[in-house]
Image: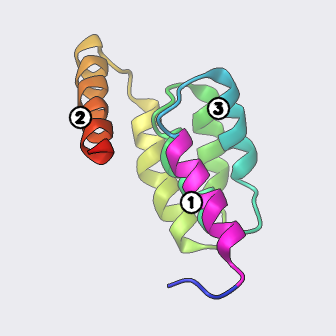
């Protein structure tokens, strides 16, 4: 449920969710910045997306999110931290790409 006047917040959450499909360095920076947004749903979406970025930068930011006052942010940060700490094999990358391509084509229909 959304309250009237929260359309701007919903747009920011949707943007963070859609950007999760992009894996550029600039996108990582956007997610890192989004972790401190005033609307708790934006940091939650950013924390979820950061799990796809392997490396210390994502892990450090996610670890900081463990102290967020909102439980939803902490609950998104925890599994994302685990994903970010695990190396990705070539097979996992290929599977991820093919699965996300299927989702996009199914949505487009």
- Identify the mark at residue 102; answer none if there is no mark: 2
Tell me if mark 1 has few (under 14), some (14-19) or many (20+) residues whose alpha carbon lies within 10 angstroms of its own. Answer: many
Mark 3 or mark 2, which has the lower sequence index? 3
Q: Position of residue 82 (x, y in %)?
A: 41, 41
Q: Which mark is residue 78?
A: none
**Residue 25: horizontal and vertical position, in percent?**
65, 22
Residue 27 - label? 3
Q: Position of residue 6 (x, y in %)?
A: 68, 78
Q: Is residue 9 above or below residue 21?
A: below
Query: How crowded is the residue under tag 3: few (<14 C-alpha within 10 Å), some, or many (20+)?
Result: some
Q: Rounded to the nearest whole Å, what is the CA distance between mark 3 and mark 1?
A: 16 Å
Task: Answer above or below: position of 97 versus 59.
Answer: above
- Give the quadrant of residue 13: bottom right
Residue that appears at 61% across and 47% down? 63
Q: Which residues are magenta?
A: 5-19
Front label number (1 vs 2):
2
* Pointer 1 or 2: first along the chain: 1
Q: Secondary structure at mark 3?
A: helix
């Amino acid at each position: 449920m959304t309250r009237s006047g929260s359309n701007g917040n919903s747009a920011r959450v949707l943007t963070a969710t859609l950007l999760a499909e992009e894996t550029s360095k600039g996108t990582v920076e956007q997610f890192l910045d989004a972790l401190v947004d005033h609307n708790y749903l934006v940091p939650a979406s950013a924390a979820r997306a950061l799990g796809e970025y392997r490396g210390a930068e994502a892990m450090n930011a996610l670890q900081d999110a463990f102290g967020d006052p909102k439980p939803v942010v902490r609950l998104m940060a925890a599994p994302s931290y685990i994903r970010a700490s695990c190396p990705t094999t070539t097979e996992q990358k290929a599977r991820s790409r093919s699965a996300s391509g299927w989702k996009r084509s199914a949505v487009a229909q």
